[in-house]
Amino acid sequence: MIYWQLFLAFFIPNIVGYGGGPAIIPLIENEVVGTYGWMTHQQFAETLALGNALPSPIATKMAGYIGYDIAGVGGAFVAVLATVGPSLLLMIAALGTLYRYRNSIKVKSMSQWVRPVVMVLMAGLTWNFLQEGVDTSGWLHTLIIGAVAALLLLKTRVHPALVVCLGLGYGALLLG
């Protein structure tokens, strides 16, 4: 039964989500935290932060980690399969049609409508992470981490993975 739940928890967000990893992360969070209660918001945020520090697509990393955490190697396999399966099937099915109509105004305008939806989903996820950070660490630490991260990302050429690692280090040293 746990394998079926893992499959559904990752298949549904990946079948309805459009726009890649950032667009489906809030949908996965809803399933993992809200529907099944396998993680808290804080644990999900930490998993996302760790996943962002590693190379490769975020959705498959999170699926592998969460699946392994819930049901071992079999759970990781099922969760990753449920994550990549919808994209693979839809890509094969739609590739011919999209290629045939690639210059159509309707196809181009449809793609433009996706961006605002992704932006709203990401804003909601950011707001949830901000609330969770304030609840667990307080305003001071949340502002320090946010300000330093913003400065490093906007004013220097520091790689985002290093910024995430610095934030993790700050949390481990001063908040742990």
Image (cartoon, helix red, strand yellow):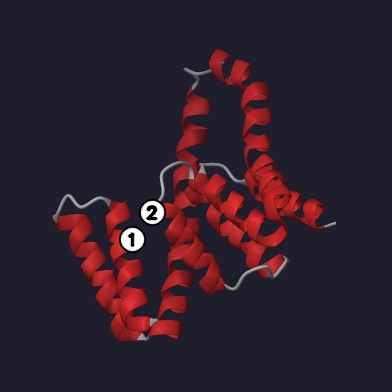
Q: Residues within 10 Å of mark 1 (few under 14, many from 20)?
A: some
Q: Residue at x 17, y 49 (%)?
A: 157
Tell me where residue 136 appears, x and y as whole percent.
45, 83
Q: Quadrant of the C terminus?
A: bottom left
Left or right, 6 with respect to 123, comes to: right
Q: Is residue 56 above or below residue 129?
A: above
Q: Are marks 1 and 2 in contact (CB under 8 Å)?
A: yes
Please indicate whether residue 48 sits to the left or right of residue 148 in the image.
Answer: right
Residue 164 bears which disc, if any?
1
Quadrant occupied by the N terminus: bottom right
Relative depth, front residue between 89 and 4: 4
Give percent across and percent down for residue 10: 67, 50
Residue 7 rendering spot, x and y as whole percentages: 74, 49
Residue that protrudes farthest toward the right in the picture = 1
Left or right, 94 with respect to 36, comes to left
Looking at the image, residue 121 lies above or below residue 136: above
Amino acid carrying mark 2 in the image: Ala
